[in-house]
Image (cartoon, rainbow, N blue to C red):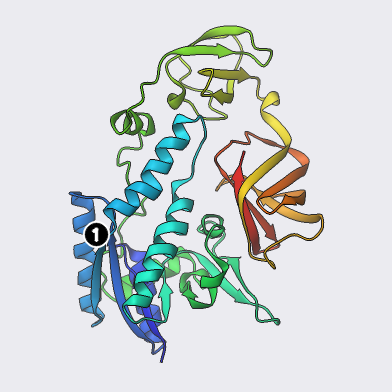
Amino acid sequence: MKKVLVAMSGGVDSAATALILKNQGLDVAGITMKLIASDVDTDKSCADAKRIADDLSISHHIVSYYDTFKEKVINSFLNDYRNGNTPNPCVVCNKTIKFGKLWEDTKALGYSHLATGHYARILCDTNGEYFIKKAKDEQKDQSYFLWGISKEILPFLMLPLGDYTKQEIRALAEQNGFVNAKKKDSQDICFINNGDYAEFIRCNSNCTFQDGDFIDINGHVIGKHKGIINYTIGQRKGLGVAFGVPMFVGKKDALKNTVTLCSDEQLYGDTLTAKSINLFINGTLEREARLLAKIRYRHTPAIATVKQIDSDTLSVKFDIPQRAIASGQSLVLYDGDMVIGGGIIQ
């Protein structure tokens, strides 16, 4: 019998994951990660997860990853923003924490498999190769966030929610009387409670973010900004300056402390380069490939020609220009519903 450790956050998705796997007759236990020290929400989540584990009559572990989470996820987030990028900390957390450190602890505790409440699926093809596949529920699909995890872990990973819709999962939780059946999904980054990225960075960084120049695409100064951390690529509202015509953030330059503004039309581009790549298909793209490419979580995947330049670099050219390509965000490549891999946009 497979021994499966379920990452239980205290939310409905991970609770349903434990229930589904237990109902399949597997030897299931739960584990909750404490990522932020002295956090009331974290303590409540641990208590909710423990209550669900008790309801399911399964053992429950708690592990503290404060230092690792701060080093690998929070500090990476801060550094990226300081450098003018738009990072995705969930991608980093999945790679280094949930499917990195937690996987190591899973094996150390004597479990053969790790399960999470992500909405995605694991596919094993006829050649015995494992891939990540989109979830049944397109609106909840989280395959975008999983491109960075090691291919070696896939045979030992279980993602049962990929075959369900969110509505089905909530109904299952209610039928089983789970205390968190109606608990709201978390929308923001877990370590930024109020969604104010700029304030979090100011409070947790030694850097000062000085006012600087707004410039147009020709480099002409057209106004003053209030520090580059206050702006994101594609932003229109909150610029603090009236230009008479709609203007959008097109680029940030941390070294020069400038924010480039442009028209909506000028936000579109048809090429990008991605580094820090991870590919699930034989580890490399041997020739140019026609794939679907996604440049942010809610972006509709677009047809592109993808070429691997070297062991750590992809070149992508879209058939149709895409809006607001942002450095630091993840490029994720799909062949239909199957994740081929991804990288960090430069």
Q: Is residue 227 left or right of residue 194?
A: right
Whole-percent x, y for residue 164 in the image: 49, 70
- Left or right of 179? Residue 104 is right
Q: Is residue 39 above or below residue 19?
A: above
Relative to 210, say whether 48 is above or below. Answer: below
Q: Looking at the image, which is closer to me, 230 or 162? A: 230
Q: Which residue is mark 1?
A: 45
Report the residue at 30% width, 65% height from top: 181
Residue at 72%, 51% in the rendered image: 310
Q: Residue at x 73, y 45 (%)?
A: 315
> What is the x, y in percent for residue 337?
66, 64
Answer whether residue 187 is visible to the viewer in this image: no
**Which three-letter amino acid code belongs to the residue tagged 1?**
Ser
> Would residue 85 be found to the left or right of residue 79 on screen?
right
- Residue drawn where x is 51% and y is 69% of the image: 162
Residue 204 occupies quadrant: top left
